[in-house]
Image: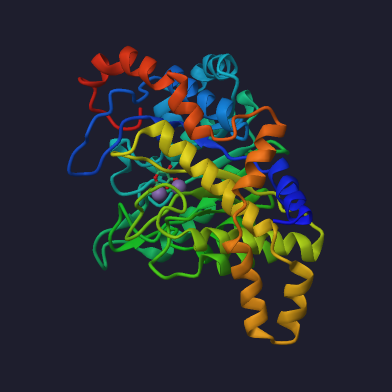
Amino acid sequence: MDARKAAGVFQALEKFRIELPSWGFANTGTRFGKFLQPAAASTAEEKFSDAGQVHLLTGVCPTVALHVLWDFPRGVASADEIKKLASEHRVQPGSINPNLFQDQHYKYGSFGNPDPAIREVALQHTRDSIKIATRLESRDISMWFADGSNYPGTANIRKRKHWFEEGLKTTHASLSPGQRLLVEYKPFEPAFYHTDIADWGMALLLARTAGPQAKVLVDTGHHYSAQNIEQIVAWLLAEEMLGGFHFNDRRYADDDLTLGSIDPYQVFRIFHEIRYFKWETGKQPDIAYMIDQSHNLKGKIEAMIQTVTMAQMLFSKAAIVDYPELAKAQQACDLVRAESLLQDAFATDVRPAIQEWRDSKGLPKDPMMAFRQSGYLEQITKQRAARNSQNVSSYA
Ligand code: RM4
Ligand code: MN
Ligand code: MN
């Protein structure tokens, strides 16, 4: 790789930060069962400790996304304790995720529930989550809804859309000036017939209705097979409505696999659209890059390191696309030249440059190897194994 490209990689990595999910360190499984990991985290302290370890070795994960029900058992009252734990482990609280899908009263929905009393419960929980975010100085309140229905004819889709508009507007009104409301979409699961916010278009409309601080969150696993995610990203960028990502990979459904494990070129194409937007417009898009993955087979911390380093690698590849040449080739409709410019960048081995960048920051060149040599996994396995063999709850 020539010096100009290496400089491009250095520059790209300088500002590239990735948020870790607290729930990605806890024991999870499938609806068929859970294979418990002796080293999984089951307290907030353990989650911060593991996240702190990933940040220590990669240097690019200073914040941890938190789930209100799982990480704040006493709601707002838990906030100070969480702040203290985070700083003890040298990370900071990141996005706050209200939990509007687990409590029994949400059986028929939260913001879209036909019962106004339950919609109010959901709104109150969201307001409390905003208070938590304010207390923790977290910027983003990230909304994912399980709302939907399982059978045709059982729900009034238009009414539910209206209730969502009302709920999100009310929520937006409680935000402090610097905060953002991120609206996530997902085509199915847990609802099997219709999901109230099923795709990016619905999320975009709802975010626009909610107010100027609302943006769309793209979870890379929340699309139908073969959907062109980078086009969605390009449109959201053009509309200045792209708020953030939940990184993971998928083969069939919302599989929550490590990023790029199935289709690294897809992730590269997403990053390419972001870099191209920046090059062309001179604007720095304000995007929160977050991980949302959970593993029942891979070790939690190693899986997280894999995703972080994969994201850095694919982001770096996108950073070395020759944009002036690409713009020329596109304008001239030189298809093969344009396509080759992308493929050349994708095929370039950026790992030596990334290792040099890490070295220049005093970070281990190979975070996975450093983790394996650190003894941390052995230590937490000893500490946590007995409790984990009895604990079967998910995420928390
Ligand atoms: C959902 C969605 C949300 C995440 C939950 C646990 O599928 O991706 O972002 O918070 O799972
Ligand atoms: Mn998600
Ligand atoms: Mn998901």
Q: Is residue 386 above or below residue 214?
A: above
Residue farthest bottom in this picture: 333
Q: Residue at x 23, y 27 (%)?
A: 392
Q: Residue at x 43, y 19 (%)?
A: 376
Q: Residue at x 28, y 45 (%)?
A: 107
Q: Position of residue 306 (x, y in %)?
A: 47, 41
Q: Nearer the viewer, residue 218 or 278?
A: 278
Residue farthest right in this picture: 282
114 lies left or right of 311: left
Quarter of the image for residue 10 reads top right
Q: Is residue 227 above or below residue 24?
A: below
Q: Position of residue 314 (x, y in %)?
A: 58, 54
User: What is the quadrant of the N terminus in the image?
Assistant: bottom right
Question: Is residue 124 at least partly visible in the picture?
Answer: no
Q: Is residue 62 above or below residue 173?
A: above
User: What is the quadrant of the C terminus in the image?
Assistant: top left
Residue farthest left in this picture: 32
Q: Position of residue 313 (x, y in %)?
A: 58, 50
